[in-house]
Amino acid sequence: MLYKSKILLIYTGGTIGMRKDFETGALKAFNFSKLLQRIPELKQLDCEIETISFENPIDSSNMNPEEWAKIATIVADNYVSFDGFVVLHGSDTMSYSASALSFMLENLSKPVIFTGSQLPIGDLRTDAKENLITAIQIASLRHNDAPVISEVCLYFEYKLYRGNRTTKINAEHFKAFTSPNYPELVESGVHLKLNPELFLPKNENKEFKVHKNLDNNVAIIKMFPGISEAVLSAILDIPNLKGVVLETYGAGNAPTEEWFLNLLKKAISRGLHIVNVTQCSGGSVRMGQYETSTGLKEIGVISGKDITTEGAITKLMYLLGQKTAQKDFKAIFERALRGEMV
Ligand code: ASP
């Protein structure tokens, strides 16, 4: 008999399962079993589907490391019994969650695919059905008795992306996500077009590990012309702050003013990790290419290369949570751990 993949559908919340509140008119999450009744098509899929839901589904604006740990726990507890996982999640913070989970789940040999929708599943014009059905189909794909995809991905509007390469770019269009520095792994058209040369290598012989300990003593600072010493030093002086993602200009450039570099230098010598990522939606940090980034390189700022801000902040939380040694931190951060950077 032909093998049927077993897929676990994990509902965390998000527009896909929301309904309008009668009194306020605002969208809020509702019961997951009712959601499934609205997609009878799922029964036609050539796989076995089981479902599990957060006890209290959330709008993804309420996501945080504790909620990520809940998703990781569900995957870990069901890892042996299922061939793939589809996580239904609000689109607002989906890229952060997919990035976080990519670090939390080490040596995956099965797919974990995040998806959601811009319109609720009950809406006549919903994008939820295509997203959900194709995400499940891709999670079920097998080759040589093993899942085809073995990483954390995000599926939205006909494209499967590496999750930690994505960012939400539109609050209105069905095409809500992009992956500025890494091509899509799969494109859905009349056929599914797979690009296997872009997949992460299989981890079948390595032990699957789950890391739930994230450290959120971190901050994101977006540079802007005119940023003041008072603002920057107030942030860098936050008690117990351990890591900062500094969103700089272009290829990783920032002011050359003495007060600016001195503040960063002092923070780094106190043990703070500062990661340079670009504000541009595509391209890479190249410290030393311009005079305006040479100083950052000299004082020991970490290069985020072509990582997204979502990838950088979650990688910081992960490496800090792992108690990565101070002396190794920069070298480890600058290495791709889950295909999140070059
Ligand atoms: N506010 C919603 C959420 O992120 C939006 C969505 O699901 O697309 O939960």
Image: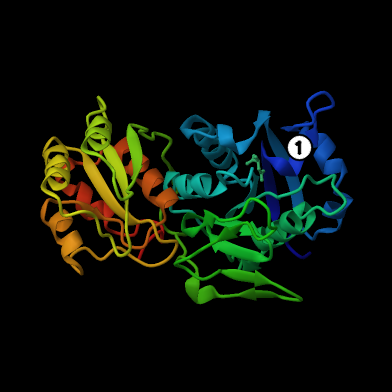
The quadrant of the picture showing ligand 1 is top right
**Where is the C terminus found, in terms of image quarters?**
bottom left
> Image height check: is 183 above or below 296?
below
* Image side of residue 128 versus residue 229, left or right: right
In which quarter of the view is residue 44 placed? Answer: bottom right
- The number of numbered discs placed on residues in the rendered structure image is 1
Residue under the point 82% across and 23% down: 23
Residue under the point 51% across and 63% down: 179
Residue placed most toward the observer, 53 or 31: 31
In percent of width and height, residue 90 lies at 64, 43
Classify mark 1 as within 8 Å of ligand 1 or not, answering yes or no: yes
In which quarter of the view is residue 34 placed? Answer: top right
The reply to whether residue 246 is in sight is yes
The reply to whether residue 207 is in sight is no
What type is the residue that disc 1 sits on? Met
In which quarter of the view is residue 35 placed? Answer: top right
> Image height check: is 53 above or below 140?
above
Residue placed most toward the observer, 162 or 77: 162
Residue placed most toward the observer, 213 or 246: 246
Residue under the point 34% across and 37% down: 219
In percent of width and height, residue 197 lies at 49, 76
**Where is the N terminus found, in terms of image quarters?**
bottom right
Identify residue for label 1: 18
Residue under the point 56% across and 69% down: 185
